[in-house]
Image: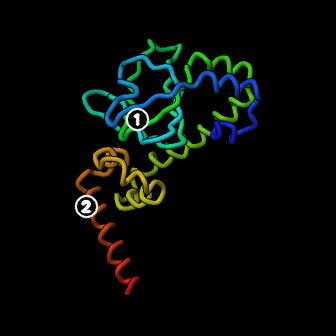
Amino acid sequence: MKVLKSYRHMPLALEQTLRESFHRFEFRKHQHVHEPDSICDYIYFVEKGVLRYYYNPGDKYEVVRFKKQNDFIYCLKSASSDDTSRLGIEALENCVLWGLPGSLVPIIQEKYIEFWRHHQAILAKELIQLETYRLYSKGIPDSFRFDYLRQEAPDLINRVPVRYLARYTQIPEKVFRHLQRSKIKLHMISSWRHKR
């Protein structure tokens, strides 16, 4: 609730509705919040843990993005689809999520349109930044992409398995592991010199 209220002043009636409607979920490491090709109609808020989005275009899984504490996960069924999705969401750690039924979204959109628009604008900005990076990173050297990940999300490197990080950054897994070992070695040498 604190995160939602920080986006924009929240009407008391909406706050009460959300407090009554959010449900607490716990997922163990490697458990799926949402299986590919199944129905999901929730908005989740991540209180604890790290999760990965992926979709299945065939036999190969491709990581789309990661979600962690204070992030929202939108897993809403579309009225224009058959209510199935190729999207999968897996817990990479023991996670605590708060879920809001998708059936409440039309009510929020109708009664509290300004709040909803403001919230969506913030999420859209984050998504555009992510997709812009993914688009323009194709011609960037692997070491630059690794450094970008290390600077922007250093905690993910220690919490997410390398095979998923490699797919996310589009760096070959062997190269990613080599860069990771090299950066650790350089950091250790730098720290040792600094202490001297």
At label 1, the amino acid type is Tyr
Residue 42 or residue 126, whichever sits in front:
42
Q: Is residue 135 above or below residue 154?
A: above
How is the structure coloured here?
Answer: rainbow
- On residue 53, the disc is 1
x and y, in percent, of residue 132 in the image: 51, 46
At a point 29% along the width and 49% down the height, the residue shown is 162
So how many labels did they put on this image? 2
Left or right of 73? Residue 29 is left
At a point 36% along the width and 30% down the height, the residue shown is 55
x and y, in percent, of residue 56 in the image: 32, 28
At label 2, the amino acid type is His
Q: Which SS class for mark 2?
A: helix
Residue under numbered circle 2: 178
- Residue 105 picture quarter: top right
- Quarter the C terminus occupies: bottom left
**Dot 2 crowding, Cα within 10 Å, few <14, some 14–19, many 20+:** few
- Residue 106 picture quarter: top right
